Image: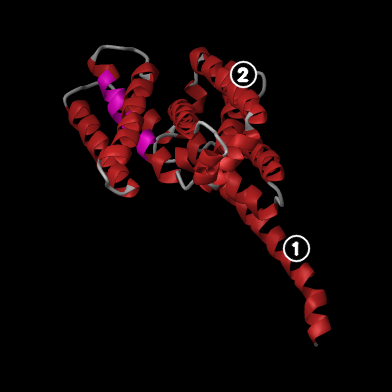
Amino acid sequence: MFTEPFMLRAILGALMLAPLCALLGVFVTARRMAFFSDTVAHASLAGTAVSFLLGLSEPTPGMIVVSLAVAAAIVWLRERSGLFNDTIMSLLLTGSVAVGTVILSRLHGFRAEIHRVLFGDILAIGSTELILAGALLLLVAIGGSWMLSPLSLITAHEDLAHVAGLRVRAFNYAFVLVLTITVTVTIRLVGILLVGALLVIPPASARLLGRTLRQEIWLAVAFGIVTGVGGVAASYAADIPCGPSIVLTGITLFAVTLGISKTRRTERLEPLVREEG
């Protein structure tokens, strides 16, 4: 498995993208932005269609541009329309999927590429995406460690962050930018339909066991690595699609951590029950 170039690229991609999503996912879940990431991911379908319509052989640039445009539209409408977030995101999600479907219905010969975008194909990940994933991981790791306290305060209480003099709006725009690019690149790993799982499952598992934010971050990154690499290995061994294999590995890990969490809680409650008895 480790001697074949496409598998080496796949494992390297999983080693970078899965922990990157898990790291961002800690803040995504805390800020209740999981639906935002799904909206951005589905916008990539329109980006893929636009790329093919323009004759581009590689859809990633078009996916990033269209996803960023949709993310900007979400922020703009949230600030100026007075509509609820879920309404805005549902509007843009369905609209971008409709646009992408209409364009793709007029094109022919891209069925295999569309399947990769919808369900992921990390075995086809290229050097450009690996370089971009590595740069994003480095950026998020350095930025996250440097700005952890401000990010934590903004995530927990935006009004208090304003009072403390933090540039909340700038932080929010930067977070949306990095999240959007990360989601778009990660689509190669698990696909549009499953990319939200990498942002939610490892952080959810980490929250069950971590007692502080730092513990949650480290556990989420570790669970992300296990989910990504374990899913690729399971996919190769069982001859099943990579995207679903990665997600199922993450869900299995979540079930294990849930069991450990319940066991710990029972052990902590037993002395109290004995004292009351």
* Residue 47 image point, x, y percent: 31, 24
Is residue 11 something that shows in the picture?
A: no
Mark 1, secondary structure of its residue: helix
**Quadrant into which the N terminus falls:** top right
**Disc nearest the viewer among 1 and 2:** 1
Residue 192 in view here? yes
Judged left or right of residue 159, residue 146 is right
Identify the residue at horizontal 40%, vertical 45% (top origin).
Answer: 35
> Any mark on residue 264, and which?
1
Q: Is residue 122 above or below residue 135?
A: below
Look at 72% across and 44% down and name the residue there: 215
Q: What residue type is disc 1 on?
A: Arg
Q: Which residues are magenta?
A: 39-50
> In this image, 181 relative to 42: left or right?
right
Q: Is residue 129 left or right of residue 212?
A: left
Task: Give yes or no for contact between labels 1 and 2 (Cβ–Cβ under 8 Å).
Answer: no
Viewer-closest of 93 and 86 = 86
User: Which residue in the protein does label 2 denote?
Assistant: 4
**Badge 2, how many Cα within 10 Å: few under 14, some, many 20+?**
few
Q: Secondary structure at mark 2?
A: loop
Camera-nearest residue between 14 and 62: 62
Residue 228, how many percent across, how many down? Answer: 60, 35
